[in-house]
């Protein structure tokens, strides 16, 4: 059997040791300890004296060894020195870490890879070669070389790293041409030129000069009257980077339309917002206009100012952190949700068609309840299996100084907003307070959803700035049976990012898109879970990035592997 | 805080009692004496209208009686008819040699009319007779403060406090003076003392909130305002301060409570209506929000516009900065509720009435784009971007202006703003301030000349204009501008006061 088929079978056979029989009363259960996930997170100094101490690191779901189980990659920052992050990364990558970079016990913080064993996770970073040492931010999974094995691109403050999957359970660091040396945050893979391989867009944040930046104790910057670290306002932005994939390496591409003002780039999402061939690129910037680019005839078309998704509905620049996209209102196009700073709401941009958006945050009920929280990762996914996409937001404060003074809590509860589209016929969100451990206050940063226990729902991993990540098993009662799709490209990229899926089930039609880099610094499970209100998919259509389509009729729930050339290759009913 | 005269009425009355008995009645029949007694009682009871009437009748029939005329002068002063009061008091003084009580009241009146030399002479004369009178000592300190002699004022205030530590007013004034001088850390103590002595002292509470915030003690500010609110549940300034604080801290429920209470006390208060509209909109309660915003817009529309003086040469619209936001929100709500034609009309009004408000262009530009007017829509959005980018730089410049050590960065930010939009009056004034503070007053004056034709905000314009003229040695022009600003009733910063009264030879100590 091919590796993909093995994976499909393994998923179906997976008997999760930590999955309870029947549905639990609390929807999300913290199974971190039970899973064996043991990761010591580090990200800068704990007093958060510089902006370099604030962003946190990402988590990525991937099946790195093709055994059908979902593994987890975690990247890490360094302990310092916060004023010299680039030097710290360079030294750590060269094997002579700066003393300030080490933990108290003298060890060097590294990323790690956790292999799913069937009864939990086992750390295999060292043996697999996946243990990047750097001031790392995002972990973005994609099959960069179209060999069928997922690779991982790690952004850092310093030189970015591509860890190429060798296909034998190991990774190698590849000199690939995309070693951006700036402060990179989010990144997204996208087949921009539709040549069948994945190009790369990297958001860059600040051109940081520690010697010239005020720090705590200088009395320069404050939030709500309390002195805090400075930035990004007042600092110099760093221009985003665009790389063309030439098959064996990446080549920098420098279209003048892309980020000429060097905004403070935070998160990137490749998403099709106009229903035409190819994905657009949307960048959430911190305190600047959000950017939207579309492939034009000869150049990049800059839609940022005219899209309606550059600012809040009132024309304010917001501090964008994370992005997610989904057809929230069931009208067949993909809407956006951008998480923002405290004392501001998370912005839901309703797609009006052809990449024109409108801020409908208040109307759909996503504004008021998000106002007092500082939001980071945001993810649309169907939590309760009712056939519409719900919204998860990971919250956590930025400034411990406010917590020290009793003004704000550093740890904040994450939030889950359930979409009422299927119940009421109209996209409205209601915050669910019955969320179990998801609502435990944490200083959360990145998050990624993935069905790690194989029970056909999306679980979550959430990273924190001041503690280890948590693994939350989704035990929510599901309304309908599920279809899980694994897509394999052929003339499209092997991981066919940008493929759109239409599922008609009963009276409900759902649209999904295969993306990577969604949320904030993380990578989600690339297998699509779609719930079937009608009990089966009356029509299942995949529109591949190159434009070809595959149509299947009367498909029952279960796991499907669909190949761009060969169609349905494997199926396992559930 | 500028004029504390009215706050000293009662203390002043006491002082006149303590000072040497004024001129005795020289004439007058028994009925007149009885009437005089009634007048004195009315004055002491605060019934100034009756006192004025009775004393007026007595003066009319006993023109040479200095005691009646003195009584009339006092009553007129306490009733706020200061010019008339001075007229009578001066006659008494000139005829009687100016005993302490007369000099005291006259000094107070002169101070209120900002006749500082005369006030100084009068109060000094009173103090020569009785230097131990606390309100008198306070007034002499107040005079020094009012003419910018802050060092002497501070010394005198501390003496007053030592004389009578349980009187809240000198503590309050000392705290205000220290805040004016940028000595917020030192201001906290006197202000806390003022509030402890008089929990209903709203001025002390508001100043103390600012001092706490300046000292990075926002939690103390919140606690103190909440405590004052408990003591003064109907104080509008305290409610407004608390609502502002809760807004900053994202405490939506408390903000709503404050705003609703403000509306109970001041129906139609536009700021409160705006806050409630914003909160309702966030919750998706669009019709509720629309009701609030209509009332807010009506309230802002009733606020007066300030017309410019000759120095500025342009009209200034000093309606609240919130007024355009209220209009924008109204248009947006109408749009969300499907009333597109009405929304468009309001958006056009917004751009017409506030041509430098960026978000009006954003709103109208997006309406045009969605309505198929692509080219016009893009133009309006480009203008929005230009204005917004300029504001970002101006905001950065304003932050850098807070420290003398970052004037170079401030200059760079303002220059970037002007490069984006040459008509940015606020950026021009900011640039002028950096130039003035860098001892380049003539360059500052050039920038201010450019700003004045563009509808510059008057307080910052006049502040920099007066100080730059002074620094450039053009004192007459500076004083002329100062007179204009005073006529416009602009509240300029304390260092302008210090400059303006530099030549006043008062506050002798």
Image (cartoon, coloured by chain):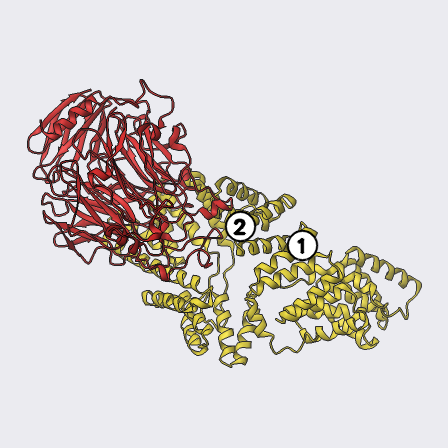
Chain colours: A red, B yellow
Q: Which residue is mark 1?
A: B193
- Tally of marks: 2
Residue B218 is labelled as: 2
Location of residue B143 in the rendering, given as x and y in whole percent from the top left corner = 67, 69
B235 up-or-down from B178: above or below: above
Location of residue B17 in the rendering, given as x and y in whole percent from the top left corner = 83, 63
Q: Nearer the viewer, residue B381 or A52?
A: A52
Residue at the (65%, 58%) spot, across then down: B190
Q: Nearer the viewer, residue A338 or A155?
A: A155
Q: Is residue A539 visible?
A: no
Task: Please tell me in which quadrant of the rendered image residue A148 appears.
Answer: top left
Name the residue at the right extreme: B30
Helix, strand or loop at label 2? It is helix
Location of residue A494 in the rendering, given as x and y in whole percent from the top left corner = 12, 38
Instruction: Check if mark 2 and mark 1 are on a common chain.
Output: yes
Q: Are marks 2 and 1 in contact (CB under 8 Å)?
A: no
Which comes before the other along the chain, label 2 or label 1? 1
Question: How far apart in space, not on screen, are marks 2 and 1 (Cα)?
Answer: 19 Å
Within 10 Å of the Cα at label 1, are there few (<14), some (14-19), or many (20+) other Cα atoms? many
The quadrant of the rendering that contains the C terminus of chain B is bottom right
Task: Please tell me in which quadrant of the rendered image residue A571 appears.
Answer: top left
Identify the subunit bearing mark 2: B
């Amino acid at each position: 059997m091919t590796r993909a088929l093995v994976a499909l079978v393994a998923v179906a056979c997976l008997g999760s040791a930590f999955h309870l029989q029947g549905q639990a009363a609390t929807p999300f259960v913290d199974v971190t300890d039970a899973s064996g996930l043991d990761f010591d997170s580090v990200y800068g100094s704990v007093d958060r004296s510089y902006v370099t101490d604030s962003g946190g690191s990402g988590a990525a779901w991937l099946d790195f060894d093709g055994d059908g189980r979902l593994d987890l990659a975690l990247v890490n920052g360094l302990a310092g020195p916060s004023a010299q992050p680039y030097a710290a990364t360079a030294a750590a990558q060269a094997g002579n870490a700066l003393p300030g970079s080490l933990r108290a016990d003298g060890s060097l913080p590294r990323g790690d890879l956790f292999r799913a064993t069937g009864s939990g996770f086992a750390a295999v970073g060292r043996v697999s070669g996946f243990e990047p040492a750097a001031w790392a931010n995002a972990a973005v999974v994609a099959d960069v070389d179209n060999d069928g094995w997922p690779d991982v691109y790690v952004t850092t403050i310093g030189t970015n790293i591509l860890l190429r999957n060798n296909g034998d359970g190991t990774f190698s660091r590849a000199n690939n041409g995309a070693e951006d040396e700036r402060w990179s945050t989010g990144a997204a893979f996208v087949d921009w030129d539709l040549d069948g391989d994945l190009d790369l867009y990297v958001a860059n944040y600040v051109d940081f000069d520690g010697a010239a930046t005020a720090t705590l104790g200088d009395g320069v910057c404050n939030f709500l009257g309390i002195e805090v670290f400075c930035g990004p306002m007042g600092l110099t932005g760093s221009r985003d980077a665009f790389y063309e994939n030439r098959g064996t390496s990446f080549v920098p591409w420098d279209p003048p339309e892309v980020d000429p003002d060097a905004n403070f780039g935070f998160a990137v999402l490749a998403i099709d917002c106009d229903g035409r061939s190819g994905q657009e690129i949307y960048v959430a910037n911190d305190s600047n206009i959000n950017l939207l680019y579309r492939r034009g005839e000869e150049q990049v078309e800059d839609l940022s100012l005219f899209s309606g998704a550059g600012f809040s509905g009132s024309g304010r620049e917001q501090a964008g952190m994370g992005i997610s996209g989904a057809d929230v209102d069931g009208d067949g196009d993909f809407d956006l949700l951008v998480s923002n700073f405290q004392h501001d709401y998370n912005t839901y941009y309703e797609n009006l068609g052809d990449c024109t958006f409108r801020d409908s945050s208040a109307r759909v009920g996503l504004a008021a309840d998000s106002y007092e929280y500082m939001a980071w990762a945001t993810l649309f996914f169907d939590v309760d299996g009712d056939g519409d996409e719900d919204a998860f937001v990971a919250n956590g404060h930025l400034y411990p100084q406010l917590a020290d003074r009793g003004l704000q809590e550093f740890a904040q509860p994450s939030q889950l907003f359930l979409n009422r589209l299927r119940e009421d016929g109209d996209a409205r969100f209601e915050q669910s307070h019955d969320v179990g451990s998801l609502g435990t206050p944490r200083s959360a940063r990145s998050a990624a959803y993935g069905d790690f226990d194989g029970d056909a729902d999306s679980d979550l991993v959430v990273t924190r700035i001041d503690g280890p990540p948590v693994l939350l098993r989704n035990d929510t009662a599901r309304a309908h049976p599920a279809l899980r799709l694994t897509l394999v490209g052929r003339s499209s990229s092997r991981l066919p990012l940008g493929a759109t899926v239409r599922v008609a089930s009963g009276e409900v039609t759902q649209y999904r898109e295969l993306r990577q880099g969604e949320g904030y610094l993380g990578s989600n499970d690339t297998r699509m879970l779609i719930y079937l209100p009608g009990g089966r998919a009356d029509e299942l259509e995949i529109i591949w990035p190159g434009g070809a389509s595959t149509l299947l009729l009367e498909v029952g729930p279960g796991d499907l592997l669909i190949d761009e050339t060969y169609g349905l290759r494997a199926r396992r009913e559930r | 805080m500028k004029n504390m005269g009215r706050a000293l009425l009662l203390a002043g009355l006491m002082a006149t009692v303590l000072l040497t008995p004024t001129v005795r009645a020289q004439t007058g029949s028994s009925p007149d004496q009885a009437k005089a007694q009634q007048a004195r009682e009315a004055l002491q009871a605060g019934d100034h209208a009756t006192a004025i009437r009775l004393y007026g009748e007595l003066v009319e029939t006993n023109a040479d009686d200095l005691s009646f005329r003195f009584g009339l002068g006092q009553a007129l002063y306490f009733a706020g008819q200061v010019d008339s009061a001075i007229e009578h008091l001066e006659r008494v003084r000139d005829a009687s040699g100016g005993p302490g009580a007369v000099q005291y009241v006259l000094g107070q009146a002169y101070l209120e009319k900002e006749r500082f030399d005369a006030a100084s002479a009068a109060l000094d004369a009173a103090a020569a007779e009785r230097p131990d009178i606390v309100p008198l000592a306070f007034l002499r300190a107040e005079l020094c403060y009012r003419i910018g002699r802050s060092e002497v004022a501070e010394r005198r205030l501390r003496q007053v406090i030592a004389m009578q530590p349980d009187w809240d007013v000198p503590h309050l004034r000392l705290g205000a003076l220290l805040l004016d001088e940028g000595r917020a850390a030192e201001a906290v103590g006197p202000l806390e003392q003022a509030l402890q002595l008089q929990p209903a002292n709203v001025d002390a509470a508001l100043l103390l909130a600012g001092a706490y915030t300046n000292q990075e003690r926002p939690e103390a500010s919140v606690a103190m305002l909440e405590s004052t609110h408990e003591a003064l549940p109907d104080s509008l300034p305290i409610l407004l301060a608390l609502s502002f604080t809760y807004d900053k801290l994202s405490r939506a429920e408390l903000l709503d409570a404050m705003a609703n209470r403000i509306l109970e006390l001041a129906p139609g208060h536009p700021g409160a209506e705006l806050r409630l509209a914003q909160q309702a909109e966030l919750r998706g309660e669009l019709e509720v929000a629309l009701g609030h915003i209509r009332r807010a817009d009506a309230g802002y529309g009733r606020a007066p516009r300030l017309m410019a003086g000759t120095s500025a040469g342009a009209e200034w619209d000093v309606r609240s900065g919130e007024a355009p936001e209220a209009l924008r929100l109204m248009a947006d709500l109408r749009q969300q509720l499907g009333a597109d034609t009405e929304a468009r009309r309001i958006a056009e009004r917004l751009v017409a009435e506030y041509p430098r408000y960026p978000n009006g262009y954003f709103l109208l530009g997006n309406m045009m784009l969605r309505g198929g007017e692509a080219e016009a829509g893009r133009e309006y959005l480009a203008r929005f971007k230009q204005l917004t980018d300029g504001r970002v730089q101006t905001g950065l410049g304003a932050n850098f202006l807070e420290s003398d050590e970052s004037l170079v960065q401030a200059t760079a930010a303002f220059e970037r703003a002007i490069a984006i939009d040459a008509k940015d009056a606020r950026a021009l004034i900011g640039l002028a301030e950096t130039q003035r503070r860098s001892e380049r007053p003539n360059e500052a004056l050039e920038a201010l000349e450019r700003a004045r034709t563009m509808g510059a905000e008057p307080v910052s314009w006049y502040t920099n204009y007066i100080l730059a003229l002074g620094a450039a040695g053009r004192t007459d022009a500076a004083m002329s501008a100062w007179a204009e600003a005073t006529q416009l009733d602009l509240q300029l910063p304390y260092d302008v006061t210090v400059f303006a009264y530099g030549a006043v030879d008062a506050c002798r100590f």
